[in-house]
Image: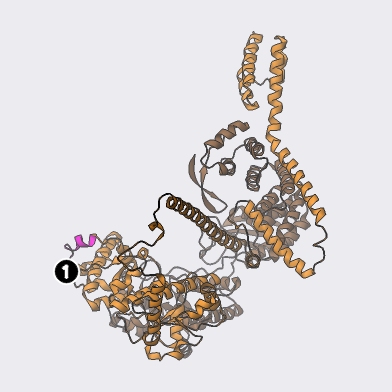
Chain colours: A orange, B brown
Amino acid sequence: MLRHLFSKGCNGLRIGCQVGTPRSQVRRFLPLTCDGVQLISCRRLCSGHPPKEKDVIQTKEDKSEQAEPLDLDRWKVVMRSQAKYQEQKVDDGLEGSNDGSLDENGDDCKNSSSLEATRELVSMWRQAGKLVPQEMTEDELRTLSELTTKSSRKKYLKYLAIREGYKLSRKEKQAQKRAEKEATMKENRDGAEEGSDQENNQIPNSLFLKFWGHSFDRVFAWRSAQAMLFGQPLVFDFSYESNMSRREIENTVSQLLEVEGWNRRAIDPFHLHFCNLQPDGPYHQELIKRYSAEVWDRLLVTNTERHYVELFPKEQLVYLTADSPNVLHSFDHSKIYIIGALVDRSIQPGLSLANAKRLKLATARLPLDEFLHWEIGAKNLTLDQMIRIMLSIKMTGKWEEALTFVPERKHDGLHQQQTKPLRTNTTTRGFTSQGWREHADRPLKLKKTHEKRTFTSPDQSKREPGGDRIVGAKEKSTSGKRVRTSLKSNLENRKAADRNKMWWDDD
Amino acid sequence: FGIKLIFMAKKVYAIYLMEPPDRPLPPDEWRKLKESFGKPQRFDVQMMTSMFISESELDVAKSLLTFVAMETGTLSYELLLRYLTLCVSGGHDEEVFDVYDIMRESFHSLDTGATTLFIKSFSRTDRWKEAMNLLDEIKKVFTPSPRNYGDVISAAMLHGDTNTAWALYDELLEKGLSPHPETWCVLFTRAEHHQRLLGILLYMRNNQIYPNKMMANAIKTWFESLSSQKWTGSWTSPRSKGLCGCCGAELESIQLTAEEYQELKEKVIADVIQGRDVFKKTTPEELEHFKEFVRRKPPFDVVVDGLNVANVNRDKSKLSHTLLAVVSELKHQGLTILVLGRKHMLRPSMSWDRKNMSLIQQKAHCFFTDNISEDDPFLLYATLHSGYHCRFVSRDLMRDHKACLPDGATRRLFFKWQRGHQLVLDGFVAAGKRVQFQSIPSYDTIVQTTSDSWHIPYDDTEDRSTYEVPQRWLCLTRKP
């Protein structure tokens, strides 16, 4: 009986082997038929069968066994042989160029070896699949080796890799465009040869004059020149070199490029002064690098290393900073406004205010809270946003138009005008900016609850302290709505509520 | 295939999670899988990564490598690196030896990730000395990480080479790195050097490091295993009067010594109040005015941060009322009070009632800074100037001011002083309720020792914030 069992089992084995499955599957059959009996003993027991079958089974099994270890470690063999081949090549190459690199100075050797080591590191990181540039210049390598921590190196390499990626993709797009242009030109030429359309190559007739770029440039230049003689000055304060890192200075200069551009194209430009600009300082070097020296010299902007206090009388100067307690309600055409050329990537609060305090200048901030539902975001605006706001307010005198240049993500839109103002003195005062913010995302509900507002301040004052938190929250929200309306209606209330919302109030 | 978010090496990656096969496949089946995959160029690396995540068997990974080798004739560095991570995490150290030889032959150097993995794997085997060579290799480009050092130290300890282990540990400290708790655990479990291990405990004391539960266990075991001395350890909490819950010994006081106090005072004035630009927080005139004010007045017993205390209730319309309640309570206790605020508090309004403010000014000395100045530095100056006994009332954690201090030692001193002198209001200030303050501990939560005892506070929870201290201690006493 056992033989029958085993014959069945062996038949199963044979069928299994003929398919040529790997060892694990073969194993799977085994336990079904012979518990715990190994392959070898199975083979022994099958000896009663015709030798042909046994041989077939045996050879197939051997193959599947032997095929296995070879299969798994085949890659090692491949890699090792490849490595040997490469070594041979390298050796041959080395024999040829052996003598050149032996006599060097000790220092040079060390420097170059450390730079080489850094280059090695970068190339190995690239091979390991990390975000690292393909090629690096000597300067970049030097900056890299000066960085000490691993994360700072990785960040710098990531920045270089992304920049390289942009350049590559731009080159590819340019090549593509050039190819397409050539293709269309070729088609046109072919088309011209076929038909006799001469007009394709000439400028088409049109009713309207074409304005070329040069014409615009000339107009803008004349206007800027006029502004430099007769226009209102606007000062940019460049005294923050020691407070910013290299990257932040580069960002500042990018923003200044935009500032100059917007100013030039405005209808009534400012006369821009770049004060405290130290020659050969980081700002100056970066500006020349971005503008190129000739353009920088031709630029219709006054840049000086003198202080703005020396250039203008103190009564006329107003420093614009987000930390100031005074709000700028209307644009004064006789005052000279100062904006700090500062980027707040690394947040250092109160820098520009400190400057203004030191020089005892008047300060002001933009009326952002009066006109916008602020959501989240720093109230520090970038330089190009500032110049657009200043130009707009100078032209129109309307804050609603000027403050459209504040980024949309920071605010929820201008305050809606209310028809029924309600005077509530008690609840306006104790209002924190938190409630304000919580409220900013419910502008629609305002109109509905508008009607059912009740003046319940005495009840409120009894209920709030401590205990009833749910009630307290509701009261807060309704009181918030009341605050909003009263803000718009009553100037005094507005100022008072503002004062209570000052940042120094929430200690 | 699906997209999965995985947490690997402290970053969150979104990868195509493929289901790796559960058995080694022959090359033609791999080819089929690769063709059906969306991005064939990244197939190999991503499949290997999925294998690592799903902890596949080694054979399956090997079959993938064979397929790639036969297809393309070579294996990329990245693929080998992923394979290496799979081997190391699975503990297949012999395989790692082969991979090491192959990678050395095929590529002229190794990157930092591969070297770390090799160090980790070699340290588990007999070839741990090669791990030391790898460590030297890393040193050429970077400072090796504490984990690298830790692996080699553990290996040295495991194989009995204690001198190397301690030499590496010293090097680790010299480079200013902080050892991993696991390294300490290994040292405590295996090393015999009495003085060295006590040195570790002193390091923890000087850097205000608290061991975790595992390490505390190791320390206890070591102490109890000392045959020449009979130490007994127990887990306990301190009692309120500053006594150990288990042996009753008095714990170190939280008060600073005279020199520490003086040093802290100078550093606070120099770095927190003045800093690099005194205009950032105040003006020089105001500072001088305040210094003169403090000099004129008698030393204070408690300094109150007016705005912080007033805002403790949710009702923001009665700020002066809250402040008056707190000041009255402190006056009732017979203390000399200084209240710090800003000038807008003197302007009559709903929150700052004129009557309340005048009452406050009768009960306490007051100083009001400009509205745009910061009042916290003045608070710290006044408290420090008035002496050891003076405390301050505020809920502010003072972390931004602590960060202005120059080095770790001063910061830890500040933190110690803060814990011993900051009165925090407990709960809300209500009409009928008496004003309560949270209690200040009289003992310092730090590793401490006397001639025959060691008291070690340890972390038994995972989520202790940096401004909190552990509550559980390990008390080790010796029978003389």
- Front residue of B453 and B287: B287
Q: Quadrant of residue B302?
A: bottom left
Instruction: Name the quadrant containing residue A453.
Output: bottom left
Magenta region: which residues? Answer: A445-453
The mark total stands at 1
- Residue that sits furthest to the top in the current view: A1
Q: Is residue B355 left or right of residue B26?
A: left
Residue A239: image location, x then y, percent: 50, 81
Check if residue B453 falls in the magenta segment.
no
Left or right of A388 in this view: B164? right
Tell me if residue B178 comes above or below residue A332 in the rendering.
above
Secondary element at image label 1:
loop
Which of B168 and A178 lies nearest the eye of the viewer?
A178
Whether residue B148 is visible: yes
B20 relative to A475 in the view: left or right: right
Q: Is residue A448 magenta?
A: yes
Across and down, in percent, residue A191 comes to 43, 50
Q: Is residue B288 above or below residue A257?
A: below
Q: Nearer the viewer, residue A171 or A269?
A: A171
Q: Position of residue B206 (x, y in %)?
A: 63, 68
Residue B247 screen position, x and y as percent: 60, 60
Which residue in the structure is indicated by mark 1? A420
Q: Quadrant of the N terminus of chain A?
A: top right
Mark 1 crowdedness (10 Å alpha carbons): few <14, some 14-19, many ≥20:
few
Residue drawn at 59 percent across, 67 percent down: B250
Q: Which of the pair A74/B211 is nearer the observer?
A: A74
Query: Could you tell me if residue B374 is visible in this image?
Result: no
Amino acid type of the residue that numbered disc 1 sits on in the rendered structure: Lys
* Chain designation of label 1: A
